[in-house]
Amino acid sequence: MLLFSMLSYSQSFMPAFSNIGTNKGMVIKQDGDTIKGTFFLINNPENIKKITIKDEDGVKHKFEAKQIKKVLIKINDLAFLDALGSTTSIKDLSQTDFIKVTKSDYYIYESAVTPKKGKIKVMQLVNFGFDSKMKVYRNPTSGETGGIKLGGIKLTGGIEKSYYILRHGEEVAIEVKKGDYKKKFYKIFTVDCPKMKDVLDGKKPDWDDFPLHVFIHNQTCE
């Protein structure tokens, strides 16, 4: 329990991509080819369906979601400040690992198969840096949970209402929602790692602690 106590205020998810200014980066295609350059069109930052990038030779390349394996978008100074300004809560602002994650060089998007009719979506990876056991993606159709505000800054709450999870070795992501988290916690975390039950300390799973649970699972489970 000491480890879990020490980590209780140490982890958050990557903030949502902020489409500010001209962003540099790269597109990795399904066949492995990589195109580096400057993005001119990102039609929907929540769920990339089409994207246009001008390469280093000035040639424009257009891609649809089915052609994309991964997208890396350079975080420029304006985007970083905007993302930091939209941080979900004061609790997040104090988290050292959150600061570490937001200083990542890139926003990362990956192609994943979702459970609804096997549809492929290119979604933002939000647990960069602690994603070796499972990848957590921002659900394009999810809203944000509520929270108490003071002067425009949230004091509590503020994570998404649902996410997609892709466990290592599996091909189809599953959706986890705030409303069913108390039941799905055990299926997500304890089937392959029974000691994750200790995280709860006799309490019911709390949705606001979902990022922390993902972090602990990544760090302590085999």
Image (spheres, helix red, strand yellow):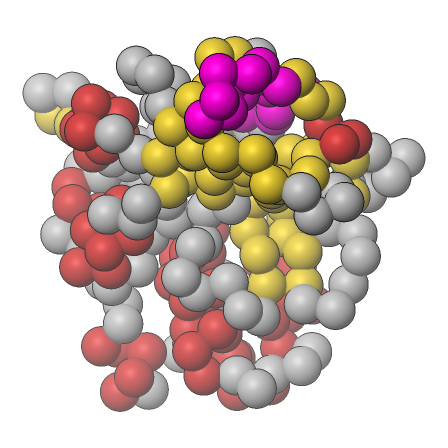
Indicate left or right for 205 with 3 as reference.
right
Viewer-nearest residue: 103 or 202: 103
Q: Position of residue 172 (x, y in %)?
A: 79, 52
The answer to which of 100 and 32 lies nearer the viewer is: 32
Q: Residue 135's quadrant in the figure?
A: bottom right
111, above or below 216, in the image: above
Would you say 156 lies left or right of 121 here?
left
- Furthest-left residue in view? 151
Indicate the position of residue 70 as horizontal and vertical percent values. 60, 42
Q: Image point 80% across, 57% down: which residue?
A: 171
- Quadrant into which the N terminus falls: bottom left
Q: Residue at position x 43%, y 55% from top?
A: 128
Q: Is residue 60 magenta?
A: yes
Nearest the viewer among 65 and 125 is 65
Vertical arrangement, residue 157 with respect to residue 183, above or below: above
Image: magenta residue range: 46-61
Residue 53 at x, y percent in the picture: 53, 20
Q: Which residue lies furthest to the front in this view?
A: 57
Number of callouts in the render? Answer: 0
Which residue ends up furthest to the right in the rendered image? 117
Q: Quadrant of the C terminus?
A: bottom right
- In the rendered image, residue 194, in percent from the top left (x then y), is placed at 60, 85
| Residue 110 in view, yes or no | yes
Identified at 16% across, 20% down, the residue is: 152
Residue 119 falls inside the magenta stretch: no
Q: Can residue 158 be seen in this view?
A: no
Q: Answer with left or right where residue 106 lies relative to residue 31.
A: left
